[in-house]
Image (tube, rainbow, N blue to C red):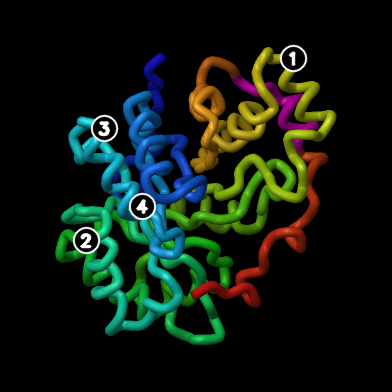
Amino acid sequence: MTLNIPTFKLSDGGQIPAVGIGSLLAKGEELAATLTKILQDGYRLIDSAQQYANEVAVGEAVKRSGIDRAEFFITTKVAGVDQGRELVRPGLEASLRRLDMDYVDALLIHWPNPSRGLYVETWEAMLELQSEGLIRHVGVSNFLPEHLDNLYAATGVYPVMNQIQLSPALPRQTSRAYHAEHGILTEAWRPLGGPENVLDQIIVKTIAEKHEVSAGQVALRWAVQQGIVPIPSSSNPSRWKANADLFSFELDERDMRDLETLDLGEATAWDARTHEEW
């Protein structure tokens, strides 16, 4: 089965596949081989990062797939060590060398790391690199509304996307409302949950049985049905196909209301005011 994944519109006029694949599942040859098959099966959105130490494998998988590079939406991220006006360009150029590509479709600031106070000038540098064609779309990851306010105040430009920790148990209502108001697409990392055990919840399993799908498909359909792009990771071939087979069923109002009861609150998510990565 070849997957047929629709796209969502971005505020800058571009488009992004409605579901992608996270690349944190492996490294090296294992990842290259797995991703090659995933891409040949129909995935087009790949999420990577310098911090994951797997950009070489991502680039290799794109080449091995035999599919035109232009069909893909490749995301990578600015690591904490590369924040700052003078470091963003060499950091991106190093990522492009590892990916063996001339451009990335999206570059995101991985974490705001507010203690350093560099994310605004990092954003300014990214906008300059976008004007040179090295980046198609500029975005952020793990930013809170207060951080996004600062980006806009300095440049008059909001990110086209913000990739945040999000699942039915962590719906991040405040951030999503802010994104909707300012034309920012929400991307979800760990959309199947982590310690919150989304897939083991009775409500999720009951809804899955009702629609004759898996618990994972319920969690991911919950996201795409609200215009959120999930990027699950899996090394299981049957699971990655199921993770993108989300468009032949629809959750009804009762399903969505029931899933709302899983909300554990914002305090359960990693706090971007204090959590920093380099």
Residue 214 in the image: above or below residue 105: above
In primary-sequence order, the first of circles 3 and 2 is 3
In primary-sequence order, the first of circles 2 and 4 is 4
Q: Quadrant of the N terminus?
A: top left
Check disc 1 and report its element: helix, strand or loop: helix
Q: Disc number at residue 97?
A: 2
Q: Disc number at residue 210?
A: 1
Mark 4 — residue?
Answer: 75
Q: Main secondary structure of the magenta part?
A: helix
> At 78% across and 55% down in the image, what residue appears?
265
> CA–CA distance between discs 2 and 1?
48 Å
Disc 3 vs disc 2: Cβ atoms closer than 8 Å?
no
Instruction: Reply yes or no: does residue 251 show up in magenta.
Output: yes
- Disc 4 crowd rating (10 Å Cα; few below 14, some 14-19, many 20+) is many
| Residue type (three-letter) at the residue carrying disc 4 | Thr
| Residue type (three-letter) at the residue carrying disc 3 | Ser
Corner quadrant of residue 34: top left
Q: Disc number at residue 65?
A: 3
Residue 112 point in image, percent of width and height = 51, 73
Check disc 3 and report its element: helix, strand or loop: helix
| Residue type (three-letter) at the residue carrying disc 1 | Lys
In primary-sequence order, the first of circles 3 and 4 is 3
> CA–CA distance between discs 2 and 4?
14 Å
Residue 70 point in image, percent of width and height = 20, 39
> At 68% across and 15% down in the image, what residue appears?
211
Q: Which region of the structure is painted magenta?
A: 250-259
| Residue type (three-letter) at the residue carrying disc 2 | Arg
- Disc 3 crowd rating (10 Å Cα; few below 14, some 14-19, many 20+) is some
Check disc 2 and report its element: helix, strand or loop: helix
